[in-house]
Amino acid sequence: MSKPIGMIGLGRTGLPVATNLLGRGHQVLGYRRTDTGDLTRAGGAMARRPREIAQQCDVILSVLPSPAALDDVMSGADGLLESLGPQHTVVELSSYPLAVKERYRRLLAERGATLLDGEISGTPAMTAARAAVILLAGDKAACEAMLPLCRDATDHAQYVGDFGAATKLKLVANHLVAVHTVAAAEALLLVERGGLDVKLAIEVLGLGAGSSTMFKQRAGRMAARQFVDPAPGPVGMLSGYLQPIADLGVEASVPTPLFDVAHQIFRRALEGGRGEHDIGCVIELLDDHASNAPHESSQERKAR
């Protein structure tokens, strides 16, 4: 592309996306409300105002932390919205309620611009390693036109259907993250309390049929009780998805008993001040629960 790619949001996820694009030869013009200089050090350029992104870029990727941040960048002083036109495609990769994305899709359409529903499934570390998945939904032709660019940002990008499908799939992905993390914590406690060789068990279980991405990524961290510095997937970040996942289950009339238990456990972690801890910290909650639970005698177990 002769014009630079616009990048709105250069935090934990946006910066790796921009860096990967630079590594594939793209020019990147970024905007961050509090510029840290990271993009310029990586070889990109920075805009002073959001509208400069629209004035210089036809394709804009957005990864912002909240709907309030999106409102500020889109509709605030020197916002993006007023400078958008038919030549623009905005790929909204942030995780917001679908109603927020729908609202901005309508606002952009009034100016002739296209907004795509995008999501990134994967941690910031996975994004940096090109291992995250970019999901695109919306106008099929527009999504397919964006797939080569997204595959320059990560090795995995997929068109997943009509507008809203990416947002819903991200919720399903985080449903699995929540359930699999609690399952991995339970399994590791079985290993520890069962007197097994922890290092060997992690290696063997990671190769077997019962493994999962969460087990492979977090079993070692759980065993070491290492949940900060760094916290690749904080409880606070996952917690933002939990109620929307529960709402999706109700909306779709799908029972979610496993997720409901995981939801309660992560809520306890958040209420216990673990918002900045990696999600693997749930092993400590389960460990504490097991330690404090009343123990049955062998005769009681037989009677039961």
Image (tube, rainbow, N blue to C red):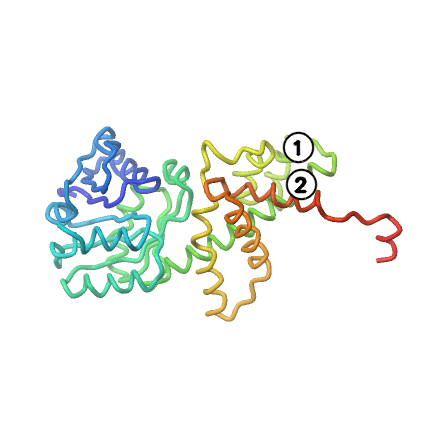
The correct choice, above or below, for 298 with respect to 246 in the image is above
Write down the residue under mark 2: 189
Horizontal relation, residue 276 to residue 297: left or right: left
Examine the image and state in which quarter residue 35 appears: top left
Horizontally, residue 53 falls left or right of residue 278, namely: left
Residue 226 locus on image (x, y percent): 54, 33
Q: Quadrant of residue 198?
A: top right
Q: Residue at x 27, y 51 (%)?
A: 69
How many numbered discs, if any? 2
Name the secondary structure under disc 1: helix
For residue 242, above or below residue 195? below
The amino acid type, in three-letter code, at marker 1 is Val
Q: Which mark is residue 198?
A: 1
Identify the residue shown where x is 40% and y is 44%: 132
Q: Which residue is painted at 87% across and 54% down in the image?
A: 302
The secondary element bearing badge 2 is classed as helix
Please state, as top left, top right, bottom left or bottom right, where the N terminus lies in the image: top left
Name the residue: 39% across, 47% down.
133
In space, the residues marked 2 and 1 are separated at their CA atoms by 10 Å
Of labels 2 and 1, earlier in sequence is 2
Disc 2 marks a residue whose amino acid type is Leu
Foreground of the two, 295 or 147:
295
How many residues crowd around disc 2 within 10 Å: few (fewer than 14), some, or many (20 or more)? many
Up-down: is 103 above or below 217? below
Front in this rendered view, residue 161 or 16: 16
